[in-house]
Image (spheres, rainbow, N blue to C red):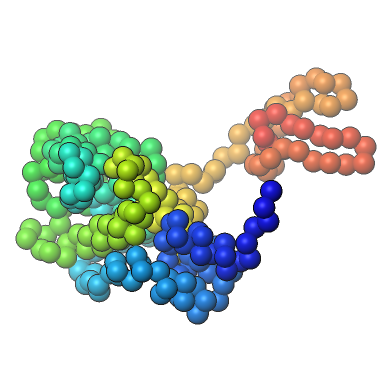
């Protein structure tokens, strides 16, 4: 097996593959800010697709993840028939999900949200514009079925959905940066790699945790409030005992000089 290149070589290879931002390189490779910025500044694709400044507008954010999402549709013409890309972003964590569809009807929006729920969880509320995609009886009934509150922005306000509009730009920027290596891939595969970069690699200098870490760390739905009772197997008698109170959740294996304890269900 060939030896790995030095840390700067690894950084260059990773950036050529994903085009993550400078804070993401600092977090992943423990570079200084100046070193990470130098890597990004030498990348012609990143320099070509820099983002302009944008007003935040009237965009209340959630205090935790899955409190307030913004959802919208953007068009990516290179995707051909599947150029209608539905995008949802969590306004607290910045975690994003996007899916390619052949239209922007309510049925397409509902398909997108079911996929987004499976990826990010179910939000308390979703903010959209007042377009026909989101004001139909079918869409309202869909959100009621999932017990999601529906909020709409100020009519004709260009900044009412500024967070998701900014996410559109971020998504298109990463897709453009990665396009040369992925131009033969399907639209959804291209989106998947871009989403991996945005959710798992990119971050900010103010918070080096990427969006996906912030999202699930602050998700009240996933916090274990009541510890369930568990059954354990005695390694000496091989008999199952319990139920016992769960003390900690994790990989259930511990070494001692007398014996190796293994508990079922990855709990101990």
Q: Nearer the viewer, residue 153 or 36?
A: 36
| Quarter assignment of residue 224 | top right
What x and y, as percent, mark residue 231? 70, 27
Residue 112: percent from the left, percent from the top?
A: 26, 39
In the image, residue 81 sits, relative to residue 214, either above or below, namely above
Q: Give percent across and percent down for residue 47.
A: 33, 71
Q: Looking at this rendering, what residue extends furthest in the front direction?
A: 2
Which residue is at the front of the view, 30 or 148? 30
The residue that appears at 36% across and 69% down in the rendered structure is 44
Q: Position of residue 256 (x, y in %)?
A: 88, 41
Left or right? Give the position of 220 relative to 168: right
| Quadrant housing the C terminus | top right
Can residue 167 be seen here? The reply is: no
Q: In this picture, is 103 found above or below 165?
A: above
Q: Is residue 75 above or below residue 31?
A: above
Residue at x 31% of width, y 40% of height: 186
The residue at 40%/69% (across/down) is 43
Residue at 81 percent of width and 34 percent of height: 261
| Quarter occupied by residue 94 | bottom left
Q: Is residue 81 visible?
A: yes
């Amino acid at each position: 097996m060939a030896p790995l290149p030095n840390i700067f070589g690894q950084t260059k290879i990773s950036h050529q593959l994903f085009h993550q931002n400078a804070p993401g390189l600092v977090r992943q490779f423990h570079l200084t800010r100046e070193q990470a910025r130098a890597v990004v500044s030498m990348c012609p694709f990143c320099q070509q697709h820099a983002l302009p400044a944008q007003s935040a507008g009237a965009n209340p954010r959630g205090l935790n993840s899955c409190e307030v999402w913004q959802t919208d549709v953007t068009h990516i013409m290179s995707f051909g028939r599947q150029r209608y890309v539905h995008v949802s972003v969590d306004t607290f964590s910045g975690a994003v999900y996007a899916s390619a569809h052949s239209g922007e009807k309510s049925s397409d929006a509902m398909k997108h949200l079911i996929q987004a729920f499976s990826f990010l969880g179910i939000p308390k509320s979703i903010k959209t514009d007042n377009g026909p995609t989101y004001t139909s009886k079918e869409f309202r009934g869909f959100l009621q079925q999932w017990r999601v509150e529906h909020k709409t922005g100020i009519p004709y306000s260009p900044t009412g959905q500024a967070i998701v509009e900014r996410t559109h730009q971020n998504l298109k920027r990463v897709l453009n940066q990665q396009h040369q290596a992925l131009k033969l891939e399907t639209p959804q595969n291209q989106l998947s790699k871009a989403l991996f970069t945005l959710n798992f690699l990119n971050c900010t200098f103010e918070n080096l945790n990427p969006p996906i870490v912030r999202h699930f760390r602050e998700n009240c739905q996933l916090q274990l409030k009541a510890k369930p009772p568990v059954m354990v197997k005695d390694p000496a008698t091989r008999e199952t005992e319990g139920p016992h109170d769960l003390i900690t959740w994790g990989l259930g294996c511990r070494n001692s000089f007398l014996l190796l304890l293994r508990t079922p269900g990855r709990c101990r």
